[in-house]
Amino acid sequence: MTQASDMPQRRTFARIGHLVATRRKLVLDYFSAISGAGGRLVFSLAYFIALANTLSIAEFGMFATASAAGIMLSRILAFGFISALYRTATIRPNLIGTFTAGFLLLGILSLPFLAAASYIVYLIFFAGTVPLSAFAAVVFAEALLWRPVEVALIVNNGLGKFGRAAVLAILATALRAIGAVLFMLGAQHSIGVWSLYYIGANAASLVVAFVFFYPRQRLRLRAELYFRRLADSIYVAGSEVLFYLQMEFDKLLVLSIGGPHLAGIYAIIMRLVDLTAIPIRTFSMMLVQRMMRAPELLSRLAVKSGIEGGVFLVSTLALVSLGIVLHFFPNALGRNVAEAAPLVALAVCVPGLRNLVEYQAELLFARGQTAVRAINLGLLAGLKAVLLIYVLTTIPDTADLVLSLNIVFLLLYVASMLLTYSAMRRPAKAI
């Protein structure tokens, strides 16, 4: 009788124990991942300080804009097949070797398209401002050296090896910071010279990533698997290009309309905004993984609004804290950054709204709605272009221009929210 009465109690304790163990693993995974984000944040800041105060403001603006274009163009590599590799690492890790071979094959096939797109972007936005050799070097570093490093990070995160991914993220960012410091200590400080240091730092990161951190599996080509997923991958590539176009298009417009010096000031402000997104991206990455396995995760309004509120609050507090530091210590990040220091706090809502647009795009990727995601990002890119062209051509004062960005990003967030959550009413795609 006593044994029978103890059974429900034992089951209750067993369920509680299982719940605690599950939550404990989730918390440990998050802290493993966030440690990488924290280390990356420290070295990213060191990299930024060294570079922003070694190049002139105008040349820093040229480099930051070329780098933004390179990040956007790097999404053409392998026609977006990285998405299939990530899903494989998350759901069917035994096929990583097969899908890595597919990534390499499609990467080679995509090179002519990447080169053609890069030259078109150069002619539209950079001709007459940035030397072609420097632009080509930066795109090469971003697309063919740094993007594969991101592949190693993505695969490790997909496998749940957040600690290894964190170590790789820290090491890769540290190598970039070391490259910037060596450049700072060098005799010549032009964008052309820096582009060579940049190639070296990214090449070192690539070697470290694939020698020490990439899973060891035999490479096997299975073309039928790749071409079955190619349409979805191309959707992802297109949406990624559009995503980074709408994220980075402001830098391209500022350079082409406002000139290199304004582009440098703007790039400094937006780089500081970018730094606030590093911890948020870690959270988004883990949420995306959970949604791949459980698409109903965000079915409740309270959960959706709570997450969005948290993302906005953390991002805003990060920029406010930075703005306070720069208000009292304008030279804290160097003499060049000091020129932009009074403007940083004016962009108070930009990090939160920008991070929310990025987060919402990831929700559609997690649900397998890649075509809808591409369409939405195209619409947002067009809206952002219209708003920014209006702001850049009608507001001559730099402080007023930065302040107006809060309205620009608020309108983008509202548009993104309407597009994303209306699309999420449809059933998630089976993965």
Image (tube, grey):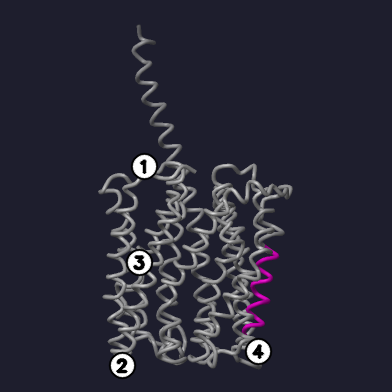
- Please state if 102 lies on the left or on the right of 335 as rendered: right
Could you say which is closer to the camera, residue 147 or residue 37? 147
Res 342 → quadrant: bottom left
Secondary structure of the residue carrying numbered label 1: helix
Which residue type carries mark 2?
Pro
Read off the residue under disc 2.
396
The quadrant in which the N terminus is found is top left
The verdict on residue 200 being magenta is yes
Compute the Cα span from label 1 to label 4: 54 Å
Q: In the rendering, which numbered label is found on residue 315?
A: 3
| Magenta residues (range) | 193-208
Up-down relation of residue 367 to residue 182 (above or below): above
Could you say which is closer to the camera, residue 61 or residue 31? 61
Q: Of discs 4 and 2, which sits in the foreground?
A: 2
Would you call the spot at circle 1 few (<14 residues within 10 Å), some (14-19), or many (20 or more)? Answer: few
Whether tag 2 and tag 1 are in contact, CB under 8 A, the answer is no
Read off the residue under disc 4.
186
Residue 63: where, in percent of width, then height? 54, 84
Q: Earlier in the sequence, mark 4 or mark 2?
A: 4
Compute the Cα span from label 2 to label 1: 47 Å
Residue 155: where, in percent of width, then height? 59, 53
- Please state if 247 lies on the left or on the right of 409 as rendered: right
Q: Earlier in the sequence, mark 3 or mark 1?
A: 1
Which residue type carries mark 3?
Ser
Q: In the rendering, which numbered label is found on residue 296?
A: 1
Compute the Cα span from label 3 to label 1: 26 Å
- Name the main secondary structure of what is drawn in magenta: helix
Compute the Cα span from label 3 to label 4: 36 Å
Could you say which is closer to the camera, residue 52 or residue 131? 131
Residue 329: where, in percent of width, then height? 37, 85
Compute the Cα span from label 4 to label 2: 37 Å
